[in-house]
Image: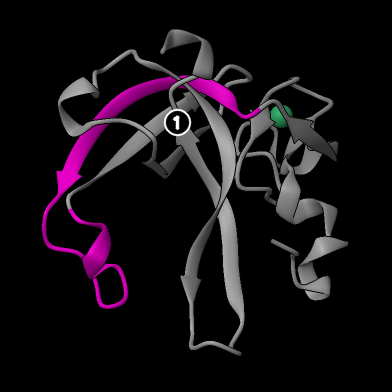
Amino acid sequence: MGAPRFWRNTKSRYNLYGVRCGTCEKNYFPPRKICPSCRRASKLESVKLKASGEVVTYTIIHSAPEGFENQTPYIMAIVKLSEGPMLTTQIVDCEIEDASIGMPVEGVFRKINESGRDGPIYYGMKFRPPRSSN
Ligand SMILES: [Zn+2]
């Protein structure tokens, strides 16, 4: 299936970009303008993150917001990336009963929502257990 041109060329939609502070050498996601540790000494630059990490904690969503009803139940997790930052994300390709704290996960791009047949389709990064563990 072809991807709409408007996002196909946008590399930031395919990759997970954070910022790296050159002063304290920590990575942050989502990107920010000032390093919370270094403040005015921040030397931030864009960095592509590996999008692999592990589940820190998770919750099963049974009652979804409008537009996501047909996806329930699903897993929302806090994932700690191997490079340090933590993010909240949906876990896909994983049975509810197989989810566990400490489970390794990797980033995957998935459709998030679609408004009508000709409307915009939103994609974003979700996470799943690595294929090799199946
Ligand atoms: Zn810093």
Residue 9 in percent (x, y) is at 88, 62
Magenta region, residue range: 51-72
Picture layout, residue 64 above or below residue 41: below
Which residue corresponds to the image point at 47% horizontal and 70% vertical from the top-left?
Answer: 113
Which of the two residues, 24 or 4, is positioned nearer the viewer here? 4
Where is mark 1, residue-wise?
A: 128
Residue shown at 24% from the left, 71% from the top? 65
Work out whether residue 33 can be spotted. no
Q: Is residue 56 above or below residue 125?
A: above
Q: What residue is drawn where x is 58% and y is 88%?
A: 119
Q: Quadrant of residue 29?
A: top right
Q: Nearer the viewer, residue 17 or 1?
A: 1
Task: Identify the image's colour scheme: rainbow, by chain, secondary structure or one colour.
Answer: one colour
Q: Amino acid at mark 1?
A: Arg
Question: Per the image, is 64 magenta?
Answer: yes
Quarter of the image containing the N terminus?
bottom right
**Horizontally, is 99 left or right of 133 in the view?**
left
In the figure, residue 97 lies in which quadrant? top left
Q: Residue furthest top?
A: 133
Ligand 1 picture quarter: top right
- Furthest residue toward front: 1
Q: Position of residue 54 (x, y in %)?
A: 43, 19
Q: Is residue 22 left or right of residue 83?
A: right
Is disc 1 surrounded by few (<14), some (14 to 19) or many (20+) residues within 10 Å? Answer: many
In terms of depth relative to the viewer, which is nearer, 92 or 65? 92
Where is residue 109? Give x, y as percent: 60, 47
